[in-house]
Amino acid sequence: MNLDNTIAQMKKGVLELCILSILNKEEEAYPSDIIIKLKEADLIVVEGTLYPLLTRLKNFGLLDYHWKESSAGPPRKYYKITENGVSKLEHLVESWNQFVSCVNQSIKSNQQ
């Protein structure tokens, strides 16, 4: 079993939570800004992974976007979290905390 692949899959599993959380803290964000924030948290994500996820979150009504003119080239798409996205984030954080607690409990019981 490839350990790197297992770790990568665990990280991919929490990207939705992380992206919603980043956008909940920011008024809006350009995708490269989101990638920078994820990299700061050691969650290395490439554009090919991020853009489909942003589109999916938008299609579910969790994100919205608007275009802004850029002095460095074509207009840029900026994302922001919607009210539905904030509600979903609250549920995800609650579920995440419960999941982490269960995993930690399982790890502790196996180490004894």
Image (spheres, rainbow, N blue to C red):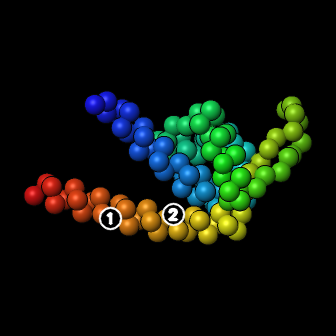
Amino acid type, label 2: Leu
- Expressed as whole percent of the image width and height from the top left, the position of residue 68 reads 86, 46
Q: Earlier in the sequence, mark 2 or mark 1?
A: 2
Q: Residue at x 31, y 33 (%)?
A: 3
Residue labelled with disc 2: 92
Q: Residue at x 54, y 56 (%)?
A: 17
Comparing 69 with 57, the one in front is 57
Res 26 visible: no
Quadrant in which residue 22 is drawn: bottom right
Q: Is residue 36 left or right of residue 6?
A: right
In the picture shown, does residue 82 fall above or below 45?
below
Mark 2: secondary structure: helix
Mark 2 and mark 1: Cα distance apart in space: 14 Å
- Expressed as whole percent of the image width and height from the top left, the position of residue 53 reads 62, 45
Comparing 86 with 35, the one in front is 86
Point out which mark residue 110 bears: none
In the picture shown, does residue 26 fall above or below 43?
below
- Expressed as whole percent of the image width and height from the top left, the position of residue 34 reads 64, 45
Mark 1: secondary structure: helix
Comparing 44 with 100, the one in front is 100
Amino acid type, label 1: Ser
Q: Is residue 62 left or right of residue 109?
A: right
Q: Residue at x 42, y 37 (%)?
A: 8
Res 29 visible: yes
Q: Residue at x 53, y 68 (%)?
A: 91
Residue labelled with disc 1: 101
Q: Residues within 10 Å of mark 2 (few under 14, many from 20)?
A: some
Q: Residues within 10 Å of mark 1 (few under 14, many from 20)?
A: few
Q: Quadrant of the N terminus?
A: top left
Tag 2 near tag 1, CB within 8 Å: no
